[in-house]
Image (cartoon, grey):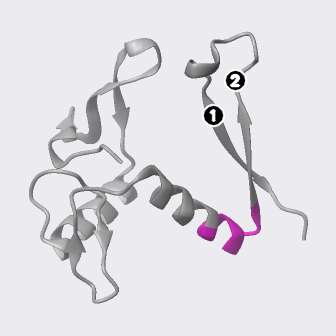
Amino acid sequence: MGLTVADLQQRDGRAAFVDLSGKGGRIRTIPVPDWVEKALQAWLQAAGITEGRIFRAVSRWGSVVGEGLSTTAVLGIVVEYAAALGLELSCRTAPKTRTPSRRAVFWQLKPGLK
């Protein structure tokens, strides 16, 4: 995942991820709730991260490794926690009218059948 420590900034007294490239190449600022900022700051302090990517792999011995998480790693984490919460993860692609090489993949969480 590409979020960096530099992306997390204070704007108007609130935390936000700033200048992120969004849909259609638009530059966006994403507000961060207070509880999320506290959790992020706790992670950054515990992991000793002061610059670069926020989310990184952690070895089974508890040390931070590498420069970031792959999309496959993030998907694995989401699937694991979704299942623990009783949610189902489904996948769909953009309509067939789009160029196949540029077809987007969308993931959606929905209540599971328990």
Magenta segment: does it hold 85? Answer: yes
| Label 1 neighbour load within 10 Å: few <14, some 14-19, many 20+ | few
Q: Quadrant of residue 106?
A: top right
Please identify the quadrant where the C terminus is shown.
bottom right
Q: Which mark is residue 94?
A: 2
Horizontal arrangement in the rendering, residue 68 relative to residue 73 (left or right):
left
Q: Residue furthest right?
A: 113
Residue 29 visible (yes or no) = yes
Callout 2 touching callout 1 (CB < 8 Å): yes
Q: Which segment is the magenta one? A: 80-87
- The residue at the far left in this view is 50
In x, y percent, where is residue 60?
34, 86
Question: In the rendered image, which residue does mark 1 sit on?
Answer: 105
The residue located at (27%, 85%) in the rendering is 62
Please identify the dominant SS of the magenta region.
Answer: helix
The relative height of residue 30 versus residue 23 in the rendered view (above or below) is: below
The relative height of residue 8 versus residue 72 in the rendered view (above or below) is: above
